[in-house]
Image: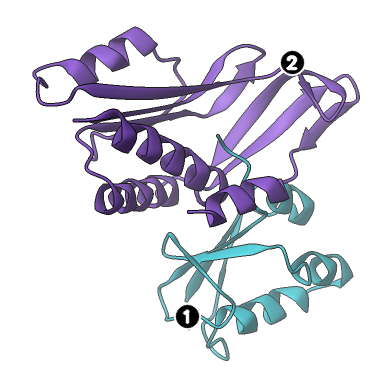
Amino acid sequence: MIKVVFFAALREQLECSELTLSSENIATVADLKQQLASKNEQWQALFDNSSLLSAINHDMVDSEQPIKPGDEVAFFPPVTGG
Amino acid sequence: MNQEISIQTADFSLADEVALLEQDNAIDGAIVTFTGRVRNHNNGMDVSGLTLEHYPGMTERSLAKIINEAKTRWHIGRVKVIHRIGELNIGEQIVFVGVTSKHRHDAFAANEFIMDFLKVQAPFWKKERTTQGEAWLEAKATDDSKAQKW
């Protein structure tokens, strides 16, 4: 299984802060994004956004990064702290 | 737990933080501190306050990596990074970065480096309350270019 978490504006737009998915057919962050985008038109629009950032197990990664079962994957907008 | 990093809802005291950086630390002649506060305006809109969200766990990990990178680039002594989360009002302190070093150059440079990378890598998000309602802040391209110059 893969735990997926969402933050800030993305969390609000999805109306979802986290979900769990089967790791079957998900090899990379790009695969996971594609699977999430297939849920409906709204999710498709939100996950097609190229400025979206992703992290695996608390490290920022790019779309080609492999995902292993048990990983925590996060998606969020560009950060605005400080 | 990493003593150099604190993510907290409570306010902090600049004087107390400086005292901790100085305590039993006669080797460092320089202390550089930065404090960030909530502005009363942004993009021409009146701001009444903001809410800060973060990604617990990743925030601490990301800040630790930035601090470690600063330590490999400059000869610095002590480092402290405080970032507040939750509801904040105008004028309240949001962020503190304190760095000590033997001579001033290292502390100045490392402090700015830590702030520049905190801005683009640490998973914090600000939602502003303005006269026109609430809105998530958009990331600024100028923040990316500041981090890239290092």
Position of B26 with respect to B61 (left or right) is left
10 Å neighbourhood of mark 2: few (<14), some, or many (≥20)? some
Q: How is the image coloured?
A: by chain
Camera-nearest label, 1 or 2: 2
The residue indicated by pointer 1 is: A67
| Number of numbered discs | 2
Q: Position of residue A21 (x, y in %)?
A: 56, 74
Q: Determine the colour of chain A.
A: cyan
* B24 is higher (above) or lower (below) than A60: above
The residue indicated by pointer 2 is: B40
Front-lying residue, A35 or B102: B102
- Element on which disc 1 rests: loop
Quarter of the picture containing the N terminus of chain B is top left
Q: Mark 1 and mark 2 in contact? Answer it, CB < 8 Å.
A: no
Residue at image location 67% in from the left, 13% down from the top: B90
Can you see residue B14? yes
10 Å neighbourhood of mark 1: few (<14), some, or many (≥20)? many
Front-lying residue, B28 or B51: B28
Label 1, label 2: how far apart the Cα atoms are? 43 Å
Position of A52 with respect to B56 (left or right) is right
* B141 is higher (above) or lower (below) than A52: above
Q: Position of residue A54 (x, y in %)?
A: 57, 65
Numbered tag placed on residue B128 in the rendering:
none
* A32 is higher (above) or lower (below) than B113: below
Query: What chain does mark 2 sit on?
Result: B
Q: Position of residue B135 (x, y in %)?
A: 80, 35
- Amino acid bearing label 1: Ile
Residue, far right: B132
Front-lying residue, A11 or A48: A48
Front-lying residue, B33 or A32: B33
- Element on which disc 2 rests: loop
Position of B140 with respect to A79 (left or right) is right
